[in-house]
Image (tube, rainbow, N blue to C red):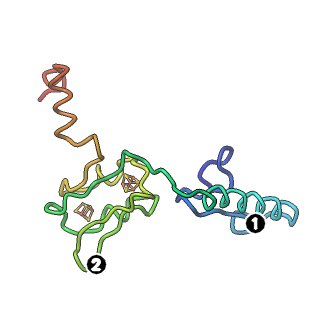
């Protein structure tokens, strides 16, 4: 499935991977060639850059808490986190992470935080805004 049917029709959800022709769905030759040209053009927008800026809001792993269970790896739709087999600790690919937070919510060990949105940072914000009572803490 493409990243967005209207806005990113030849991109996959994972950055740097593009789709064209029958890999996408059944279509005739003209449409396949048109889509292949679009995919090649999209690829050029990446490979002609000297540097690529990535998201600032990404997941960070607390290695002391990670048990290496691999649940986050299963959850991530962008293939941005995987368990290092030797160290048995989750490792984030910062270039692929979209900061969606799905892995953070799924980690039962509390080993993941979104940069800038850790529990401590959120509760500090609530305290500063005097929202702790409202939220029942
Ligand atoms: S779900 Fe949590 S404990 Fe399990 S591998 Fe991922 S970060 Fe580590
Ligand atoms: S924040 Fe989202 S994109 Fe990033 S590693 Fe977690 S699930 Fe994957």
Q: Is residue 134 above or below residue 41?
A: above
What quarter of the picture does the C terminus occupy? Answer: top left
Q: How many discs mark residues in the rendered view? A: 2
Q: Position of residue 73 (x, y in %)?
A: 35, 65
Q: Nearer the viewer, residue 121 or 135?
A: 121
Determine whether label 2 and label 1 are within 8 Å by CB: no
Outermost residue, right side: 30
Which one is in front, 121 or 1? 121
Which tag, 2 or 1, sits closer to the chain's start? 1
Judging by the rendered image, the residue that carries numbered circle 1 is: 21
Q: Residues within 10 Å of mark 2 (few under 14, many from 20)?
A: few
Number of the front mark, 2 or 1: 2
Q: State the residue at coordinates (59%, 52%).
A: 3
Name the residue located 40 percent from the left edge and 59 percent from the top edge.
76
Residue occupying the point 57% across, 62% down: 16
Name the residue carrying label 2.
Answer: 85
């Amino acid at each position: 499935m493409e990243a967005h049917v209207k806005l990113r029709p030849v991109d996959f959800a994972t950055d740097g991977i593009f789709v064209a022709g029958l890999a996408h769905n059944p279509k005739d030759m003209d449409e396949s060639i048109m889509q292949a040209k679009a995919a090649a053009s999209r690829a050029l927008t990446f490979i002609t850059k000297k540097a690529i800026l990535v998201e600032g809001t990404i997941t960070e792993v607390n290695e002391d808490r990670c048990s290496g269970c691999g649940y986050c790896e299963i959850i991530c739709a962008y293939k941005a986190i995987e368990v290092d087999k030797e160290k048995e600790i989750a490792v984030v690919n910062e270039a692929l992470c979209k900061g969606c937070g799905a892995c953070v919510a799924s980690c039962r060990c509390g080993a993941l935080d979104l940069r800038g949105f850790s529990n401590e940072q959120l509760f500090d914000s609530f305290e500063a805004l005097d929202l702790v009572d409202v939220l029942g803490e």
